Amino acid sequence: MEINQVTAIILIILVLVGSALLIQFRGTPFVKKYWRYALIIIPGLILIILKLLTMKTKKPGSTDVGTAITGIKDQLQEAKLVTAIEATAARTENKIKLEELKKVTQITDSQERRKRLAELMG
């Protein structure tokens, strides 16, 4: 919970306690005199406090969330494209190496075959 929410909850509790006290002491001259004002002020205070509870506050240094999300999505899309291109290039190199490997394994001379396999490895 943020401090604003804690403060708002404390304020709403105080307003409710005040309302209960007004109802309890409704027979006193002071409460009889100002009862009409309390009927307007108490619901107004409750509405203001509830509005404070539902408000979302921005932290001082934070950027706009939508802009940040859009930037992250663009970076992810770029990384995805780069990865796809690298994977495609790697697949084509592997196919070439696999074809060379098949040719090398068909060589009957073992010394020549080992020599070519070493060339493929390094």
Image (cartoon, rainbow, N blue to C red):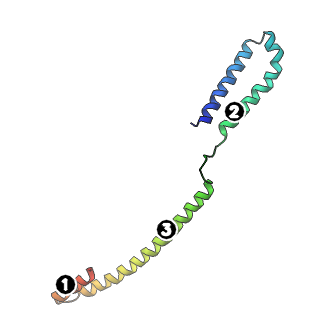
Q: At label 1, which amino acid type do we have?
A: Arg
Location of residue 26 by image quarter: top right
Residue 116 vertical position relative to residue 81 in the rendered view, above or below:
below
The residue that appears at 79% across and 14% down in the rendered structure is 31
Frontmost residue, 111 versus 60: 60
Q: At label 3, which amino acid type do we have?
A: Ala
Among the two numbered marks 3 and 1 on one chain, the one whose residue lies closer to the N terminus: 3
Left or right, residue 38 beside residue 83: right
- Cα separation between marks 3 and 1: 39 Å
Question: Which type of secondary structure does the marked residue at label 3 adopt?
Answer: helix
Location of residue 43 by image quarter: top right
Left or right, residue 43 beside residue 98: right
Q: Which residue is mark 1?
A: 114
Q: At label 2, which amino acid type do we have?
A: Ile
Q: Which residue is mark 3?
A: 79
Q: Residue extending furthest top? A: 28
The residue that appears at 58% across and 58% down in the rendered structure is 69
Residue 72 vertical position relative to residue 114 in the rendered view, above or below:
above
Residue 78 spot, x, y in % from top left = 52, 69
The image quadrant where one finds the N terminus is: top right
The image quadrant where one finds the C terminus is: bottom left
Viewer-nearest of labels 3 and 1? 3
Q: Which mark is residue 49?
A: 2
Frontmost residue, 42 versus 91: 42
- Cα separation between marks 2 and 3: 46 Å
The residue that appears at 32% across and 82% down in the rendered structure is 97
Residue 70 spot, x, y in % from top left = 59, 61
| Label 2 crowd bin: few (<14), some (14–19), many (20+), radius 10 Å | many
Among the two numbered marks 1 and 2 on one chain, the one whose residue lies closer to the N terminus: 2
